[in-house]
Image: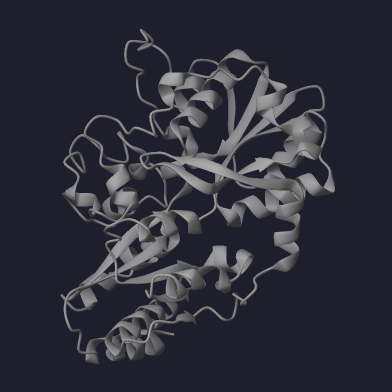
Amino acid sequence: MLTEAKQWLGRIQRLELPSTLRIMNVCGGHERSITQAGLRSLLSDKLELIPGPGCPVCICPEEDLYAAIQLALHEPVTLLTYGDMLRVPVNVAKGSGQRGEPRTLMAARASGADIQPVASPQQVLEIARDNPGRQICFFMAGFETTTAPLAALLAEGVPNNLSILLSARLTWPAVAMLLNSEAPGFDGLIAPGHVAAIMGAEQWRFVVQRHGIASAVAGFSAESLLAAIYSTLRQVVEGTPMLDNCYREVVREQGNLAAQQIIDQVLTVVDGNWRGIGMIPSSGFQLRDEYARHDARKRFAIVEDAQRKRAGEMPPGCECAQVVLGRIYPKQCALYGRSCTPRQPMGPCMVSDEGACRIWWSNGVLA
């Protein structure tokens, strides 16, 4: 494997790049692999690898997180969620007089709410079955990779005491939004391997066909990432943009058709709000009417706060949105490593293991 990585690295280094090129990696898992392997330090000064919008915790809208906190505080439920979500902060609403309220799920738990971290939808199912007399609510923020197993769970049937507070998103519409903007900010795209394993490599062909942008699907090893980087750079150098699948051992052109069918059976696509970005058309998931009895928004009196719907406003001074959009690197945020660290995060990008700020800080990239 090391030999193969060196071979790909050598091919990249022999390419004559015409100018500084920017390659965006969409997936937070890709960013973690790139940073941990120190790939940026091994590549040409003419190449920039840009973190993209592939962190579901980072873009989970504030109103959904606020609703989860309020639900756990004011309803007799056990709220389950992935561990990263526990420390994501919401803002103090302007003029609300609510500065004493918990700003994170962890703080809500400290205030007496029954909140538990989980690792998978299967664990959620087991907890619901083991506690038939208790209302269980799963607050799920994720992309297609984690949405598929949740949909399968609901399709197979779940206990009546289980409800879902869904904050799931599709990945490709965020990239489409960037490409449709006046300044996309990148010359090539590394598409997410795990998402493509579910939805298919072909889902990313629009990047080439509509925008003429070099693209490659990558896995998470250094070999696969370097192969994808080489492919996109070569496409740019030769002027032949295409969609290259560099993760063929896992990703098929059409993806996992059975998983897609289950997603379509259980969920419908709606417009979705992305924290720090705003509303992106056809980028969210919602439970279909047939599964509405498990929709937490319909089962409980979810506390809605209109002040939370500010296009996903970040805390004052926090540049998480610009990091997610690939417009700045994490260390270019004025808060990075100063008032914002993993121990005391100001924004969601410093919380999640897939957030670029957390990844950079954890791997020794200082302010």
Q: Nearer the viewer, residue 88 or 341?
A: 88
Image point 28% across, 57% down: which residue?
Answer: 182
Q: Is residue 98 above or below residue 319?
A: above
- Position of 92 compared to 203: left or right? left
Q: Is residue 142 above or below residue 21?
A: above
Image point 65% across, 26% down: which residue?
Answer: 297
Image x and y of residue 102, in percent? 43, 18
Q: Nearer the viewer, residue 265 or 195?
A: 265
Q: Quadrant of residue 341?
A: top left
Is residue 103 among what the camera can see? no
Question: What colouring method underlies this structural image?
Answer: one colour
Q: Is residue 336 above or below residue 74?
A: below
- Position of 312 compared to 84: left or right? left
Image x and y of residue 106, in percent? 47, 27
Is residue 316 among what the camera can see? yes
Image x and y of residue 204, in percent? 50, 69
Image point 59% across, 13% down: which residue?
Answer: 74
Q: Is residue 98 above or below residue 249?
A: above
Q: Quadrant of the N terminus?
A: bottom left
